[in-house]
Image: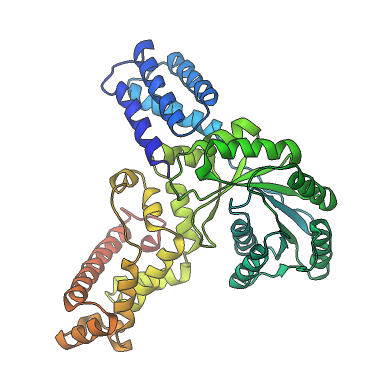
């Protein structure tokens, strides 16, 4: 995400590369390029100008330390101002009450229904809640069916009244149902339109008045840029919502919505969503997003995602196997599945400082995992436990069973052997206390 903006900002900072000090001339040139970059990212010109004026004032007011170059200082100033522009820090999310009520609003096609099921999964798996989803879109039949299917996939119930066309009644009955069935969070998916209209606003305002929600979340497609910001403003004037959800951040988004919404409506971005998978929902951290926009990575989010999949007992068992050179294909397959659960591999690698820029033009094929899984699952239990018994006939049989060539199987086995040696070496280093302190291999 934000690749074009990142490149333009990097280009702007080059004006200060090799400069010995901050001056009005080189700052003016840099700020001008930053403003252009923001406008091209679909940020409103007034917002872009206000932002760059603040950057300029701070830059000219700073005394550059001998250990800090002008370019580094400008990067830090822009990072701080981007963080402030997007909200400063992660916002709170109110789930108090029995039940707490979350009202989801937005235009048709913004991703409300998909977000509803992602939020339900998030609250169940990460916050220990017992959510109930409510199919409150009475105009689009597919919305009810979609939510029911999504609910079944994550084993979270969906309250529906398919013959009832009154969303206020549905919402009130859903809350009564939640109280009698021990659901402590009710998430109401509401109807959307192709554009803002008075009828829709009256309807969702009536739902709000009837259920008194803890949180009203406005869901917006981040790929719509300034249109998203204008729609948010219209909704906020009628609903006074509590926060924004940016969806489809994995698409061809220029960043305008993320950078402009807080400034325009003075409401925080609370969640960001990428892709269709249920676990691709994250709490929005302005400071981390600013770092990613500037190509600094987001190692904190990367570690958090890894920790979500981390099983300490299994890690200790794995460490023992590595130390005894007993790491086998079953262990490898288990680790592969954990990595896949963390999300899109290219996005994950982009969170590591310095890696995102290096791989921006690299096509990382997620299907390559399937090839490896096919090779391992075509092995016998004995072969998975004993990588060293792989002779020619076994390799040929595995190739046929997995739909790969013998050369591809040989290549994987060679890579596996190299990885075992590397892990063994890393484990020895960590035992000596030099690297991986606190990580699975460094216990």
**50 relative to 158 in the view: left or right:** left
The quarter of the picture where the N terminus appears is top left
Q: Image quadrant of residue 114? A: bottom right
Q: Residue at x 59, y 52 (%)?
A: 109
Q: Nearer the viewer, residue 413 or 133?
A: 133
The spot of residue 162 in percent (x, y) is 75, 68
Q: Image quadrant of residue 46? A: top right
Q: In the rendered image of this protein, does residue 131 appear above or below residue 6?
A: below
**400 relative to 164 in the view: left or right:** left
Q: In the rendered image of this protein, does residue 384 appear above or below residue 41?
A: below
The spot of residue 35 in percent (x, y) is 44, 24
**21 relative to 90 in the view: left or right:** left
Q: Nearer the viewer, residue 284 or 231?
A: 231
Q: Nearer the viewer, residue 442 or 201?
A: 201
Q: Residue at x 23, y 81 (%)?
A: 399
The quarter of the picture where the C terminus appears is bottom left
Q: Residue at x 62, y 62 (%)?
A: 117
The spot of residue 351 in percent (x, y) is 40, 48
């Amino acid at each position: 995400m934000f690749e074009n903006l990142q490149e333009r900002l990097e280009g702007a900072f080059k004006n200060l590369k090799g400069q010995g000090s901050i001056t009005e001339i080189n700052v003016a040139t840099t700020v001008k390029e930053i403003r252009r970059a923001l406008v091209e990212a679909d940020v409103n010109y007034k917002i872009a100008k206000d932002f760059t004026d603040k950057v300029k004032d701070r830059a000219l007011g700073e005394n550059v330390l001998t250990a800090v170059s002008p370019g580094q200082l400008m990067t830090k100033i822009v990072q701080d101002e981007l963080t402030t522009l997007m909200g400063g820090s992660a916002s709170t999310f109110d789930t108090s009450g029995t039940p707490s009520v979350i009202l989801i609003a937005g235009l048709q096609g913004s991703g409300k229904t998909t977000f509803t099921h992602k939020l339900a999964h998030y609250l169940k798996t990460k916050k220990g809640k017992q959510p109930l989803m409510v199919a409150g879109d009475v105009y689009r039949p597919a919305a009810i069916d979609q939510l029911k299917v999504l609910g079944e996939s994550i084993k979270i119930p969906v309250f529906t009244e398919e013959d009832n066309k009154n969303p206020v009644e549905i919402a009130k009955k859903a809350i009564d149902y939640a109280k009698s069935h021990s659901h402590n969070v009710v998430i109401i998916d509401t109807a959307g339109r192709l554009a803002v209209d008075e009828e829709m606003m009256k309807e969702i305002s009536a739902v709000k008045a009837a259920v008194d929600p803890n949180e009203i979340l406005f869901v917006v497609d981040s790929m719509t840029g300034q249109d998203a910001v204008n729609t948010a403003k219209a909704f906020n004037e009628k609903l006074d919502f509590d926060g924004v959800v940016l969806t489809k951040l994995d698409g061809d988004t220029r960043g305008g919505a993320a950078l402009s919404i807080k400034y325009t409506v003075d409401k925080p971005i609370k969640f960001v969503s990428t892709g269709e998978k249920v676990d691709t929902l994250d709490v929005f951290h302005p400071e981390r997003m600013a770092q990613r926009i500037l190509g600094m990575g987001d190692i904190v989010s990367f570690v958090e995602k890894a920790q979500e999949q981390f099983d300490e007992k299994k890690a200790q068992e794995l460490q023992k196997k590595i130390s005894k050179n007993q790491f086998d294909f079953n262990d490898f397959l288990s680790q592969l599945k954990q990595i896949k659960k963390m999300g899109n591999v290219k996005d994950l690698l982009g969170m590591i400082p310095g890696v995102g820029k290096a791989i921006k033009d690299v096509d990382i094929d997620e299907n390559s995992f399937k090839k490896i899984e096919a090779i391992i699952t075509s092995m016998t239990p004995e072969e998975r436990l004993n990588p060293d018994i792989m002779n020619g006939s076994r390799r040929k049989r595995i190739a046929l069973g997995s739909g790969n060539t013998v050369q591809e199987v040989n290549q994987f086995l060679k890579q596996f052997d190299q990885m075992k040696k590397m892990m063994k070496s890393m484990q020895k280093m960590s035992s000596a206390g030099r690297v991986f302190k606190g990580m699975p291999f460094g216990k």
